[in-house]
């Protein structure tokens, strides 16, 4: 019977919620989870209630985050948590406990407003990155809570923005997805002559060239022109939808990821060089006092 007791103890430990490591683009985590659509839950299981959601809440509170999606801690379920007291344009330092967060399971956006605004966003999975992103000002949402009740709400302003950012991550999009940012990303703390800047310049150039080709086609191809004009999107947005296929998005993500890693490595080298320079002792001739001379402190 001893082996059954040990098995029971192991299973009990596996069901114990803990603070999870955040998946980030820089630390060797499996960053592919940030690009894959999460699985919706047909029903809210015991494992979801007692392990997944508590771990998500604990991790969000521990890291003082405004929001956290399950994919950011390597859990493949459609769930996210959002702080109950959000402050406009505040992306960190939310001091609180697990009960300070709302839980959203299988979240959906039902309706969106026509009005959008452009703001800078940050994400703990992409350290030192800021992205200029258009979000809808007002949205109607639907989700399930931990009691398996279906709830509908309306959100506006920063609350709507946070919800859209979080649900993007559950759909496999993030703040460096080209379709989300149009390549408008930058380092929060600037890095001179960064590899990231080179990558962004290259992809923005490719996008401009592709749009130019579609513009030429729009002029000469009546069928294509008709499809563009009938679309719910304006011409520029329609062109972007045509260009931004899976391969383009994946290539952009991989190139940005590698650029950030290279820049971080270079920055660490520079920091080490500075420390080595500062700690290097002065030449012996400068440090040594003249023979038989007395130090000022002993006068």
Image (cartoon, rainbow, N blue to C red):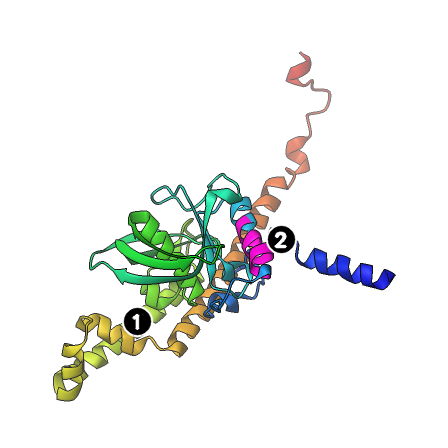
Residue 92 screen position, x and y as percent: 45, 44
- Give me the disc on residue 205: 1
Which is nearer the eye, 187 or 154? 154
Residue depicted at 46% across the width and 41% down the height: 94
Residue 218 vs 292, above or below: the answer is: below
Which is nearer the eye, 270 or 10? 10
Question: Would residue 46 appear left or right of 108 to someone viewing this image?
Answer: right
Q: How would you classify the magenta stretch by its main secondary structure?
A: helix
Q: Residue furthest top?
A: 299
The residue indicated by pointer 2 is 17
Rounded to the nearest angstrom, the CA distance separating label 2 from label 1 is: 46 Å
Question: Would residue 160 appear left or right of 128 to someone viewing this image?
Answer: left
Residue depicted at 19% across the width and 72% down the height: 232
**Res 265 → quadrant:** bottom right
Is residue 71 visible in the rendered image? The answer is yes
Residue depicted at 86% across the width and 62% down the height: 1
Residue 91 screen position, x and y as percent: 41, 46
Residue 45 screen position, x and y as percent: 56, 62
Residue 223 screen position, x and y as percent: 15, 88
Is residue 126 visible in the rendered image? The answer is no
SS type, badge 1: helix
**Res 203 → quadrant:** bottom left
Q: Dot 2, how many residues are within 10 Å of its Cα: few (below 14), some (14-19), or many (20+)?
A: some
SS type, badge 2: loop
Residue depicted at 69% across the width and 19% down the height: 293
Please state the extent of the stretch shown in magenta in the rendering.
47-57
Q: Nearer the viewer, mark 2 or mark 1?
A: 2
Which comes sooner in the sequence, label 2 or label 1? Answer: 2
């Amino acid at each position: 019977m001893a082996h059954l007791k040990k098995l029971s103890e192991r299973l009990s430990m596996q069901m114990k919620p803990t603070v999870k490591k955040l998946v980030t683009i820089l630390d060797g985590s499996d960053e592919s989870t940030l690009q894959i659509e999460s699985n919706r839950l047909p029903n809210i299981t015991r494992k979801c209630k007692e392990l997944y959601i508590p771990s998500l809440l604990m991790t969000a509170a521990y890291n003082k985050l405004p929001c956290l999606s399950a994919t950011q801690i390597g859990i493949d379920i459609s769930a996210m948590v959002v702080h109950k007291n959000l402050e406009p344009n505040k992306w960190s330092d939310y001091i609180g406990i697990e009960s300070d967060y709302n839980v959203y399971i299988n979240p959906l956006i039902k309706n969106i407003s026509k009005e959008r605004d452009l703001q800078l966003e940050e994400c703990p999975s992409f350290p030192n990155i800021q992205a200029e992103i258009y979000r809808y000002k007002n949205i109607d949402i639907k989700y399930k809570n931990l009691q398996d009740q279906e709830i509908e709400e309306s959100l506006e302003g920063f609350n709507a923005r946070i919800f859209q950012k979080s649900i993007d991550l559950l759909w496999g999009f993030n703040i460096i997805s080209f379709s989300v940012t149009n390549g408008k990303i930058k380092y929060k703390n600037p890095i001179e002559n960064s590899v990231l800047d080179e990558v962004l310049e290259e992809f923005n150039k490719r996008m401009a060239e592709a749009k130019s080709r579609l513009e030429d086609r729009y002029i000469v191809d009546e069928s294509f022109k008709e499809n563009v004009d009938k679309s719910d999107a304006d011409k520029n947005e329609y062109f972007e939808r045509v260009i931004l296929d899976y391969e383009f998005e994946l290539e952009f993500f991989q190139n940005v990821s590698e650029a950030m890693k290279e820049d971080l490595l270079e920055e660490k080298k520079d920091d080490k060089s500075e420390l080595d320079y500062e700690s290097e002792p002065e030449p012996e001739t400068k440090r040594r006092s003249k023979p038989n001379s007395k130090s000022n402190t002993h006068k």
